[in-house]
Amino acid sequence: MSYTMTELIGLKRDGGELDADAIEWIISEFTADRVPDYQMSSLLMAILLNGMSAAELAPWTEAMLHSGEVLHLDAVLKPKVDKHSTGGVGDKISIPLAPIVAACGVAVPMMSGRGLGHTGGTLDKLESIPGFTTQIPPEDFVDQLNDIGVVMVGQTEALVPADRRIYSLRDASGTVPSVPLISSSIMSKKLAEDLDGLLLDVKVGSGAFMKTKAEAEILARTMVGIGASHGTPVTAMLTDMSQPLGATVGNSNEIIESIAVLRGEGPPDVTELTLTFATEMLVLAGYENRDDAHHAVHHAVSSGDALDVMMALTARQGGDARYLENPALFERAPHEHVIPATRSGFVHRCDALSLGVAGVRLGAGRATKSSVIDPTVGFTIEMKVGDRVAEGEPLARVAYRDQGSLESALSVLQETWEIADEPCEAPELIMGVIS
């Protein structure tokens, strides 16, 4: 079949439906550099505005999946289970989660992404460990999975290259919050991993791309359905992202917090989700008794086995493991600014979205496709929803490099915290499960 990108953009712009042949042509031509970024960006915007039917989504995901090589992990002797988050602020769960699950005897071939919009990226955080590489040859996957049980990488030129390129275009073109684009991006990467099971963390709230539970349920059911059509069991958990996870937002500081979780010293919300997700991943891997899975997860942390796996993973992928032993080695941003409470009372809001946007303005995320991330900047959050605060007490500490980026960040932080006289409770972390 012969097409032009202009006619296909127009078809989608006007509410038409792309057939499977046209979708295969788009993805193959874009991957081969015969469709320019500006035309693909236009198509992505048309998809954002008009959505995709089920008849479009299946071939779109399939074309992305087969835009490059697909892993064949038959030689991995353990069950293979992965987890993916739809993205949030302060969401470092994958980093302690993967070594915990690996320490329990499950292989975790984790293919992650970079920061997208106002949300952080697992790869960017891992690369704040000096020397850590998130690009390893696919032929090394099997050996590493059999040796230490975990790989944490991004897409390569060979594996799902269409998604890698579309992913960065979405970030720079304002087309991130689209159910078909999010679901096909996640599932094409995960199905390329030859998995036995997949856990999805679908975020809900101001700091997520899905603002309401109803929207998140649609996304979750879409991805569970894609998994079922490919014979891969998928469980989706809907979790709160109305406020940031943990006490830090940034890159190197989120690595430090992740190591604290592996030492049994992490903040309660990050610890709870990490251990809950790990238990669910063991169930997907074949644990028949959930209590046994729960016990195995807690033992992996208390025994130090999970931290040992993280150390081995870091060394295997070129990172300097001394930084995990001694987090004081991480470079710190040169300046700190304290945001004080303007009144006494109880925190009713600590808005994840504004903190995420402020983080990008500081340099912790990408404002453009080619932006370089500063791993040293970010926030330490002192007060979250439900906390009692006195006037003048710190709400957060901002680590920054220059005055211009600080002022830009502060301009979106004016309404981040809401303080009222009445006590309130923190939101529930887990809002639902779909499988």
Image (cartoon, grey):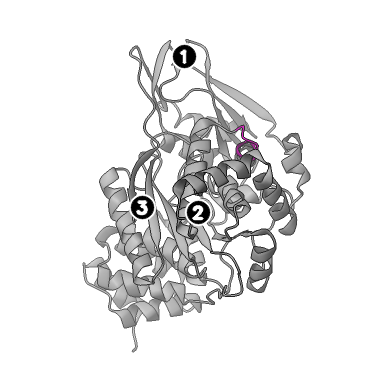
* Relative height, residue 307 to residue 281 (above, below): above
Distance Cα–Cα, label 3 vs label 2: 30 Å
Q: Position of residue 110 (x, y in %)?
A: 56, 59
Q: Do we see residue 92 in this rendering?
A: no
Q: In the displayed structure, does residue 434 sit left or right of residue 383?
A: left
Which residue carries the number 3 mark?
177
Compare residues 430 and 408 and report the one nearer the observer: 430
Label disc, if present, on residue 290 of the rendered structure: none
Q: Position of residue 232 (x, y in %)?
A: 41, 67
On the image, which quarter does residue 317 sit in? bottom right
Distance Cα–Cα, label 3 vs label 1: 34 Å
Q: Position of residue 112 (x, y in %)?
A: 54, 57
Say which residue appears at 60% left-offset and 50% top-offset: 124
Q: Position of residue 413 (x, y in %)?
A: 46, 29
* Residue sitting at the far bottom: 1
Mark closer to the chain start, 2 or 1: 2
Mark closer to the chain start, 3 or 2: 3
Give the position of the C terminus as an image quadrant: bottom left
Give the secondary structure at mark 3: loop
- Residue stretch rendered in magenta on the structure: 259-265
Say which residue appears at 66% left-offset and 65% top-offset: 146
Q: Is residue 24 magenta?
A: no
Label disc, if present, on residue 389 of the rendered structure: 1
Q: Amino acid at mark 3?
A: Pro
Which residue carries the number 2 mark?
282
Q: Do we see residue 53 in this rendering?
A: yes
Q: Nearer the viewer, mark 2 or mark 1?
A: 2
Q: Amino acid at mark 2?
A: Leu
Say which residue appears at 61% left-offset and 47% top-offset: 125
Mark closer to the chain start, 3 or 1: 3
